[in-house]
Image (spheres, grey):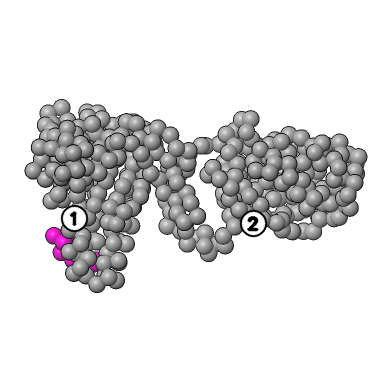
């Protein structure tokens, strides 16, 4: 995830306190001084606007409706200047009231595309707090509707020293909490890293529950749903705990990616993938016990593979958000997993040989003396494996 350097706090002590607290709490917020110049923008707001800390950033010290800030904001909106003009119609009376030099001074600092609106304004003293019509903030490569409000900031003497502009996603807090209450912050950071799809080398883990159909027929629908929910939650937690990114869920299947750029090295990514596959069976045994099942009723098969040229990215729609990957290695991992019947964990030679000596030793894998078997030669080889990936060499880990 992009890490921004926190902007300097405003010189005004009151504005500085607001800026520091809002930033620490992760709010979307912009703080203006008494003349509507931008004096602080929280990190979360900057990240959502695509601020990379250089020319894409907010103009600190610039007027909110001046040429520089208007130009930057126009680039964020599909209808460009029209959105800025509508915003100025809403805020203009308050901005005019706060402008020491009146209309002449306001016209001097404004973007020329707003000059014709100045004479239409009637100065109005801003209330202590007011709302703005819903707006769109550029986020995750698309437009996110937001609810917005403004708060006047006064110092200890009661003098207005500025205004804070607060935004939040349009859903209510109960809906936001429901969607994010269980989220792991580290995992959210890793997902943010892949907002923009790109080539990303990674270890791939695929796992599936064996003999799920007989189990589903044996249990009541409510029992099987409860078991499946426990299984997916436990698998996801295990992936997250080992620094992976949770991929799509299909039925009882689990997919995970361990990126080189987050793990730190190819060896670390490969080790995290193997560690996860080893940790899951014991966690699943506990799920079986809590679900009133025997250990033998629940068995996972694992396919582990290396993706040198995976194209990894995040897909967000109105209904869901997930990370997925494209590439031959994804299909090959699925073929490896399908051959790992009997609760085996099969790893490709391409994955195992990413391990350096220290990580291989920590895993108890003698990688330099390991022997491999082509998928096509396994007794458990599926027709698809023989057809699509016959020469992929694997071993048990």
Compare marks 1 and 2 and give the one earlier in the sequence.
2
Front residue of this view, candidates 242 and 52: 52
Q: Quadrant of residue 333?
A: top left
Query: Crowding at label 1, few (<14), some or many (≥20) Cα neighbours within 10 Å?
Result: many
Is any part of residue 61 visible from this angle? no
The answer to if 296 sits in the magenta stretch is: yes
Which region is colored magenta? 290-298
What residue would you read off at disc 2? 147
Q: Secondary structure at mark 2?
A: strand
What residue would you read off at disc 1? 210
- Residue 159 image point, x, y percent: 82, 51
- Residue 382 image point, x, y percent: 15, 45
Q: Residue at x 20, y 68 (%)?
A: 217
Q: Quadrant of residue 388?
A: top left
Q: Residue at x 25, y 49 (%)?
A: 207
- Residue 156 image point, x, y percent: 77, 53
Q: Is residue 375 left or right of residue 65?
A: left
Front residue of this view, candidates 389 and 144: 389
Q: Is residue 233 left or right of residue 12?
A: left
Front residue of this view, candidates 33 and 54: 54
Residue 146's label in the rendered image is: none
Query: Crowding at label 2, few (<14), some or many (≥20) Cα neighbours within 10 Å?
Result: some
Is any part of residue 331 visible from this angle? yes
Q: Quadrant of residue 282?
A: bottom left
Question: Do the residues under discs 1 and 2 have CB atoms within 8 angstroms?
Answer: no
Q: Is residue 364 above or below residue 283?
A: above
Quadrant (top left, top right, bottom left, bottom right) of the C terminus: top left
Q: Is residue 301 above or below residue 37?
A: below
Q: Secondary structure at mark 1?
A: loop
Q: Residue at x 30, y 40 (%)?
A: 330
């Amino acid at each position: 995830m992009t890490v921004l350097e926190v902007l300097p706090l405003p010189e005004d002590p009151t504005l500085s306190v607001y800026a520091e607290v809002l930033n620490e709490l992760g709010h979307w917020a912009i703080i203006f001084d008494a003349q509507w110049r931008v004096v602080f923008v929280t990190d979360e707001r900057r990240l959502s606007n695509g601020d990379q800390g250089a020319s894409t950033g907010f103009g600190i010290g610039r007027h909110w409706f001046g040429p520089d800030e208007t130009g930057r904001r126009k680039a964020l909106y599909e209808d460009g200047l029209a959105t800025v003009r509508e915003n100025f119609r809403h805020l203009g009376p308050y901005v005019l009231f706060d402008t020491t030099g009146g209309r002449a001074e306001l016209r001097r600092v404004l973007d020329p595309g707003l000059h014709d609106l100045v004479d239409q304004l009637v100065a109005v003293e801003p209330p202590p707090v007011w709302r703005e019509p819903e707006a769109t903030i550029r986020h995750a490569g698309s437009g996110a509707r937001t609810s917005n409000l403004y708060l006047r900031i006064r110092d200890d003497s009661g003098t207005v020293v500025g205004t804070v502009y607060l935004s939040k996603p349009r859903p209510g807090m109960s809906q936001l909490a429901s969607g994010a209450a269980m989220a792991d912050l580290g995992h959210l950071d890793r997902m943010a890293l892949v907002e923009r799809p790109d080539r990303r080398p990674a270890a791939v883990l695929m796992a599936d529950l064996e003999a799920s159909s007989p189990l589903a027929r044996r249990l009541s629908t409510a029992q099987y749903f409860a078991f499946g929910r426990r299984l997916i939650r436990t698998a996801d937690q295990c992936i997250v705990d080992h620094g992976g990114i949770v991929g799509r869920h299909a039925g009882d299947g689990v997919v995970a990616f361990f990126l080189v750029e987050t793990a730190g090295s190819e060896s670390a990514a490969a080790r995290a993938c193997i560690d996860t596959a080893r940790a899951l069976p014991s966690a699943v045994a506990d799920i079986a016990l809590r679900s009133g099942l025997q250990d033998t009723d629940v068995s996972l098969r694992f396919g582990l593979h290396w993706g040198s040229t995976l194209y990894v990215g995040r897909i967000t729609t109105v209904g869901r958000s997930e990370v997925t990957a494209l590439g031959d290695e994804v299909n090959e991992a699925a073929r490896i997993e399908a051959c790992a019947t009997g609760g085996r964990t099969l790893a490709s030679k391409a994955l195992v040989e990413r391990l350096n000596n220290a990580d291989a030793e920590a895993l108890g894998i003698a990688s330099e003396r390991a022997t491999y078997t082509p998928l096509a030669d396994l007794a458990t080889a599926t027709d698809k494996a023989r057809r699509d990936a016959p020469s992929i060499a694997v071993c048990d880990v």
